[in-house]
Image: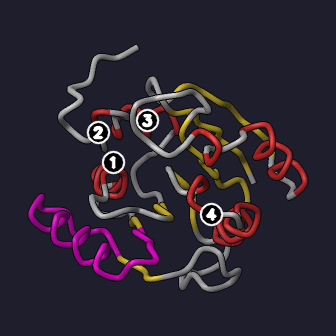
Amino acid sequence: MTNLDPSKVPGGNELINAKDFLTKVGLEEKMRVGDLGCGARGYFATQAAKMVGNKGIVYAVDVVKNVLTSVLSQAHILGIYNIKTIWSNLEKYGATKILPNSLNVALLINVLFQTKEDETVIKEAIRLLKLDGKLVVCDWKRTGALFGPPVELRVDFARIKQIGAALGLKLEKEFAAGPYHWALVFKK
């Protein structure tokens, strides 16, 4: 178990090292990446943007509009200009304004525990992926911790694997993404 200062609310790099994580996923220069449900800090969107370089693009997608403003501001402070923000509800199939079949990688990081529409969210991510594109699902393990969502809301990874298989995805690999998260990497 990792010793975290309980006076701090953990988030971002205290839990998952974004650069190491995205390296394991296989991000490369010139890729098109969707950080679907990017969150206010945009940890993964900004790191992905650095990794794909100026000839790549990262779409930071979220349902909360002011989150997108925050992500873009933080990216610009860091000198990152290859992030495009998209306001969308991932629970509505076809709503995300990214060209279908255009992404090399779609990231769903700490998203599925927040929805009862996980299959629809996964379908929306698949719709955006190129053939041979990767869908990355990373979420809280079903173990107790003093922080994070209640255990009963955490993702059942066996069920996510079943949904992926039923939707024609092939599980490429899975790995521990820090002490509290698990990741699945599917190929379309």
How far is mark 1 from mark 4, CA to CA?
29 Å
How far is mark 4 from mark 3, CA to CA?
23 Å
**Among the 4 quarters of the image, the one containing residue 8:** top left
Residue under pointer 2: 10
Instruction: Classify the position of the C terminus by image quarter.
Output: bottom right
Q: Quick one: label 1, few (<14), some, or many (20+) residues within 10 Å?
A: many
Q: Earlier in the sequence, mark 2 or mark 3?
A: 2
Q: Nearer the viewer, residue 151 or 79?
A: 151
Identity of the amino acid at label 1? Met
Residue under pointer 3: 21
Mark 2 against mark 1, which lies toward the viewer? 2
Q: Earlier in the sequence, mark 2 or mark 4?
A: 2
Q: Earlier in the sequence, mark 2 or mark 1?
A: 2
Q: Is 173 covered by the magenta stretch?
A: no
Residue under pointer 1: 51
Q: Earlier in the sequence, mark 3 or mark 1?
A: 3
Note whether 186 is above or below 30 in the view shown.
above
How far is mark 2 from mark 3, CA to CA?
17 Å
The structure residue drawn at horizontal position 20% and vertical position 26%, both measured from the top left corner, is 5
Q: Quick check: 62 left or right of 53?
A: right
How far is mark 2 from mark 4, CA to CA?
21 Å
